[in-house]
Image (cartoon, rainbow, N blue to C red):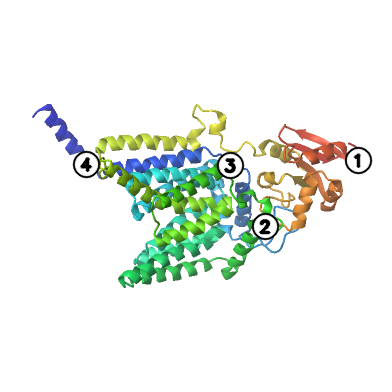
Amino acid sequence: MSQAGTDLHISQRWSDRVIWRPSLLHVWAMLAVVAAALGSALQPLEPIDYWWGVRLGDLIRATHAIPTDDPLIYTPLRGQIVDGQWLAKVLLSLMHQAGGVELALALRSTVAIGTALLLIRACLAAGAGPRTSAVVAGLAAILFVPGLAVRPQLFAVIPFVILWQAALYPSRWIAWLVLVGAVVAFWANVHGSFILIGPLLGAGFVDAALAYWHTRDVAPLRRWAVLAVVCVGAPLLNPYGPGLAAYVADTILVNGGGTATGVLGVEWGPPTVKTLYGAGYFTSVLAVIGLLAAGRRPRPGEALLLVVFGLLALSSIRHILWWSLIVTPFVARETGQLLSGLLSRAGCAPGPLPAGATRLNVICLVALGTLVVLSMPWTRGRLPLPPARTALMDALTPVAVAEYLAAHPTAGRLFNDTNWSAYLAWRLGAPGGSFVDNRFELHPPEVWDAYSTISRGYPSWQGRLDGYGATRLVLDPLTQPGLVEAVRAAPGWQLVYDDGMALVFDRSPNGQH
């Protein structure tokens, strides 16, 4: 046998022993996975939501009960708390105990990767080609990865995609319906965004109703009706029953700008082109407009979702996440078809995606998989990169001042920058230790008015602090310069800590500055 024949025979024998033969489809999909993983790796852990989530989860686990008030702050609340995110907090607490910040960041990467893969599947189901699906899903990571902060909302992303696809392509299998019901019940206990099942089911109904209109086949409409019953009933499996809806409505009303405190939440404000994230959103909108102008038309259910989620994203930065998912299959399918038409007219239409050589595919997957592994928090810190690229926690996290406060406790109450409250609550573990934190919906407007007045160093700052019993100030000179200046000039306060990022003032024992 010739050498070529021997090589071919060996290759065939090796191929026969391979149980799973990766194709070029898997290589293309891996490109989107790498984009999602590397995008996640560029974002350190935020200093706000994660830490109060962990702390409250610790308390729920310790007491075996969901608090009806807030144990982390000492100022008045707007009313009794309904905690629709209790399960997410418990999960964050368990993860932090098991693996700390590294495991939390790995969870974000895992959700990002899973989202990218589900988006590729959604694109293929919508009729897009494999190459276009992978490329557009990878580009979508530019918009959806920044929305994956490690907080309760992170647990809602995969359920959103699962229900979205289930609504558009309802299955007749009972096991699938049970799984979807469990996913929706989970969603309702981790984040208030479960109310988005409304427009998702609405899009499915539009498609099923039109299918019946054109074909008189009642099966899609029947399958949708069964799915709708499951999805409407599953959210009731929560500690509050139907009362959970009031919590969601109240949160939207307060944070959405319907009250005096709504303007405080930056992520609840509309996007602008002045930020990269906002510019990315408007670029995606222009892409949709361009496809529409080129004669590409969404399907009826798609059109409903594009309008609903496009308007949501236009009204609030935090909704760009959902828009980025909804828009991806439409852009992938219509872009692919548009490019195929242009190439066909040019006489160089692309053919179907070949399987490719198995060995070469394996090599590509291993190389790309290595990038994913290196992006994980356990390995990223060992790479020869600038510290800003390998840091696990955001540089604005008040780690140093928290260590000082833990080593020098006092019996009084803190007044600090609201962005630091979550981390201080976790690190210090003191009940009712902070004035306010970034859960804006918890506090009545007068509390936020007091916080603003004190932080700006207005003349009544001292009296307001006295009224709340605050005896220690932990201040950010960048965000609270007015108060820093006022405290330095006032008698009765002593500077006890200054690390350049944070200042700590205690009341002087002798009443002198």
Residue found at x 62% / y 51%: 269
Q: Earlier in the sequence, mark 4 or mark 3?
A: 4
> Which numbered circle lies on residue 441?
2
373 or 195, nearer to the observer: 195
Quick one: SS at disc 4? Answer: helix
Q: Quadrant of residue 246?
A: bottom right
Residue type, mark 1 in image: Gly
Can residue 121 be seen?
yes
In the rendering, at what x and y percent does residue 116 appear?
42, 47
Pointer 2 or 3: first along the chain: 3
Residue 74 visible in the current orientation: no
Residue behind mark 4:
17
The mark found on residue 81 in the picture is none
Numbered badge on residue 511: 1
Quadrant position of residue 441: bottom right
Between disc 2 and disc 4, the foreground one is 2
User: Residue at point 45% right, 52% down?
Assistant: 327
Report the disc number at residue 275.
Answer: 3
